[in-house]
Amino acid sequence: MAQLSICMPSNRPLTKSLGAIESALTYAEKTGARLIVCDNSRDPEKRAFLENHSPNLLYHYSQSEDVSGNWQEAMSLADTPFLLPMGDDDEIHFSASETPVDLSSLPDDVIGVRPQTQIWTAENGVCQTECYTIDASSPGDRLQEFTRKVMGNNSIYYSIYRTNVFVPLLRFFTQAHPTNGAYCDWSLSLALISAGKMIHDPSLIYRYDLGVWATEQGIAAASSDLYQKAGLPADSEKFAALLRFLDVHVFTLRGSLALSPAERDEVLLMNGRLAMAEFLQSVRTNAADYDEVVVYLAEMIEQERDIQSIFHLALLMTDCIKPGLKDGYIRFFQAAALA
């Protein structure tokens, strides 16, 4: 039985996604994995080429028009114990000189396996290689470890995960989150890391294409675009830490997350120490960039010690980002108990 499904939601036509697909299929054929291409490109040449192309490839013609729907369709097709989310502009390769991790023998406290991640640009090739693990035993310490080790990008998101951890989180996110924005990938990674350790497989090489994120100008434009596509103002980057605080808080309250009450409390407190502290620092330093209501609520949070009270004050701020966003977050919070 295959242990791994490589899940690739794909919107690019065949000419722009073929390199990614061929690299993943070669890896699958060498390792016994399965590649799932969930295609909503509407490219007839791509469909004709991929249907019945290989026994290691499952091609699915997606009915979803948006990114989140296509992701959810791809994940729903994974029936293996582990899955690897993959972009259709990235590549993966197998290093025969390295010993692969035996997924079937991983201890229960390991929820993921990160590859040897190569940060790549078309102009400069491989800029850096990332192999760090997340080894801390407690979930709060893992969040702190990730914050300390992260190297400016969220490449660890593209790792191997236990399907029964990854899919429920993504399903809850796509069905209940108030914006469903692609900017939430950092919050999703933190939620996954809170669920277990991440080890390293040197035999799996993941080439992560920075694309427009390769320059400061590109980062600014791409960030604004992510928030606008999520229905938020273009300058919402200044609220990134606040939104991350709210998202990770709600993700931690999910009923399906296998944490003890003490571990949940630990994650909630560490999330406050990391994300909310970052946001409060931003408001103190750049008060003129924020609404006076946000500044007032931030001052109230500075005096508060109860994490649930801090969460409720933070909720009030969201209507300063976009009117009505608070109600969306309240529904998101209420849905967590059933997720």
Image (cartoon, rainbow, N blue to C red):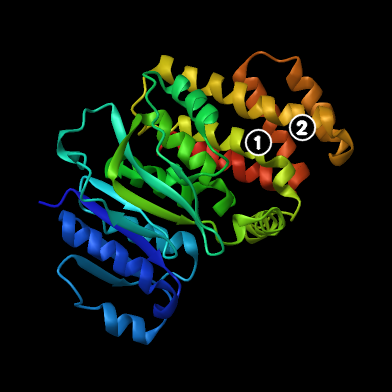
- 10 Å crowding of disc 1: few (<14), some (14-19), many (20+): some
In the visual, does 33 lie left or right of 229? Answer: left
Callout 2 secondary element: helix
**Residue carrying label 2:** 282
Q: Is disc 2 in contact with disc 1, using a CB cutoff of under 8 Å?
A: yes
**Residue carrying label 1:** 241
Is residue 215 visible in the rendered structure shown here?
yes
Q: How many marks?
A: 2
- Which badge, 2 or 1, is on the more N-terminal residue? 1
- Disc 1 marks a residue whose amino acid type is Ala
Q: Nearer the viewer, residue 323 or 242?
A: 242
What distance separates the C-alpha of mark 2 from that of mark 1? 9 Å
Image x and y of residue 159, in percent: 36, 45
| Residue at 53% across, 23% down | 268
* Image position of 223 with respect to 194: above or below: below
Image x and y of residue 190, in percent: 48, 35
- Disc 2 marks a residue whose amino acid type is Ser
Residue 99 occupies quadrant: top left
- 10 Å crowding of disc 2: few (<14), some (14-19), many (20+): some
| Residue at 70% across, 53% down | 216
In the visual, does 252 lie left or right of 292? Answer: left
* Image position of 330 with respect to 307: above or below: below
Image x and y of residue 205, in percent: 34, 50
In the visual, does 38 lie left or right of 331? Answer: left
* Image position of 35 with respect to 323: above or below: below
Q: Nearer the viewer, residue 32 or 260?
A: 32
| Residue at 21% across, 47% down | 97
| Residue at 22% across, 67% down | 57
Q: Nearer the viewer, residue 292 or 54?
A: 54
Callout 1 secondary element: helix
- In this view, the residue farthest toward the left is 1
